[in-house]
Image (cartoon, coloured by chain):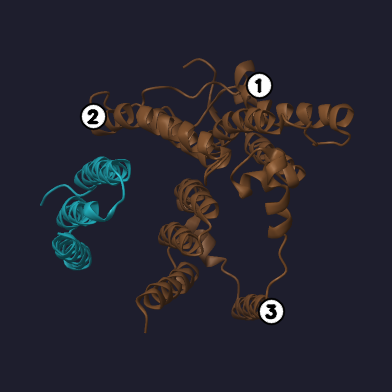
Chain colours: A cyan, B brown
Amino acid sequence: MSLLLDAWTVVAVSAGLFFFLAGTIGLLRFPDTLTRLHALTKADNLGLGLVVLGLLPQVDGVLAGLKLICVWLLVLLAGSTASQLIARVARRSEPPA
Amino acid sequence: MSPTLLVDGGLLAMVVLVAMWTILVRDSFAAVIGYACYGLLLAFAWVRLAAIDAALTEAAIGGGLTSVLLIRAVVRLRATEASAQLEAPGRTLRFGAAVLSIAVAVALGAVVLGLPDPAPSLAPQVAEHIASTGLGNAVTAVLLSFRAIDTLLEAVVLIYALVAVWALTPDRLWGGRPGPKYADDPNGMLAYMARLLAPLGIVVAIYVFWVGADLPGGKFQAGTLLAAMWLLTIMAGLTDVPPISRRWLRIALVAGTVVFLAIGFAGVPLAGAFLAYPEGVAKPLILIIEAASMVSIAVTLGLLVIGPPERSESP
């Protein structure tokens, strides 16, 4: 059972890291602000989500697990709000051609 | 190579690289963002050194609050940046500055590497006497009991910083409201986040303050969180900044220092020394000081970020 949980952790955290990597590459390579934001929010949502899901079997106690999930939800809230605000500024300052 | 060494080495390399990038980059805004990243990386370094208190403070003050202050400064200076670039110091001066800072870095490195092994430490004394404070967190015990005078002076320095900011007020606006009026869409994203996050942030801040007695945390981290939540509601347009002439505002600013001093002087007749706590009641007294300081720190930091008054008293 513990082997299975460890395997789950490795798989989920690796998948999360893949999304972070992809998000970072997107941030560096995509051509404009909106697409870069799109790449970045994927890293926040899926990447961190998968890392948290992967770490859940490793924590000792329900409380620590809840804390991890809270961290994820807070980052979701902050990340999505910040990207909305940046997108709004971007759209106002560079009107679509 | 062990994985721990790999993580620590990577962290160190990133800290140094981001620090260099922050200095070398031409654009002030980029430099400030670099500084914020540097603060967060440094917080990770403190976590790796098991100094969670320092990590929390670095993340809150170094990475968060100072960066916000610097971002506002950059935005304000943007209009004059081009002319300031023209007045950039000459090659000799810059070379001299580089040599000087490298010399300081090398000297610091030499001193740190030259420390005797084991390094001189007061940790055993702290561990021996911590029971007298009733606290479980050695950092809080040092800050509020063994070296209380330093913490007291720190609180005073913060007030002085705010006085310096307020001194920039034009005469006709003295007593007015600091900063611009934020009028964001009341149904927009920012207002939504402020409504959702501020209550959560306040609860977390009070938790951080409360556990500070026994676990990493304390008034400074909690005060910064409170200030951040206050700023969030102000910038979302949910509340307005009070005019700096309000009496309750002035009282909130000095409450921490006044309570600290009052308890400190009460220690002279009751415990035989300034800032000494009477036997048995050290912990409640420390908690009272921390609570008052938390409020003062939150108000001071918030007002420091908002800046000097820019509007007259009427909203």
Identify residue type, mark 3: Ala
Q: Mark 3 packing: few (<14 Cα in 10 Å), some, or many (20+)?
A: few
Q: Chain of mark 3?
A: B
Amino acid type at mark 2? Gly
- Quarter holding the N terminus of chain B is bottom left
- Farthest bottom residue in view: B1
Pick the front one: A7 or A40: A7
Contact, mark 2 vs mark 3 (Cβ under 8 Å):
no
Q: Is residue B52 left or right of residue A33?
A: right
- On the image, numbered disc 2 is attached to which residue? B188
Closer mark to the observer between disc 2 and disc 3: 3
- Residue type (three-letter) at the residue carrying disc 1: Ile
Q: Residue at x 46, y 34 (%)?
A: B207
Q: Residue at x 62, y 79 (%)?
A: B102
* Side of B176 relative to B206 (left or right): right
Residue B235, label in figure: none
Q: Residue A38, image x and y in percent?
A: 15, 53
Considering depth in this image, is A32 or A39 the residue closer to the camera?
A39
Secondary structure found at label 1: helix
Check if mark 1 and mark 3 are on a common chain: yes
Q: Position of residue A76 (x, y in %)?
A: 23, 44
Image position of B251 with respect to B100: above or below = above
Residue at image mark 3: B107
Which residue lies under the disc numbered 1? B251
**What SS does tag 3 mark?**
helix
Q: CA distance from mark 1 to mark 3?
A: 45 Å
Q: Chain of mark 2?
A: B
Percent of width and height locating residue B229: 42, 33
Q: Earlier in the sequence, mark 2 or mark 3?
A: 3
Seen in the picture, residue B79 relative to B233 is either above or below; the reply is below
Picture quadrant of residue B254: top right
Q: Which residue is most to the left?
A: A97
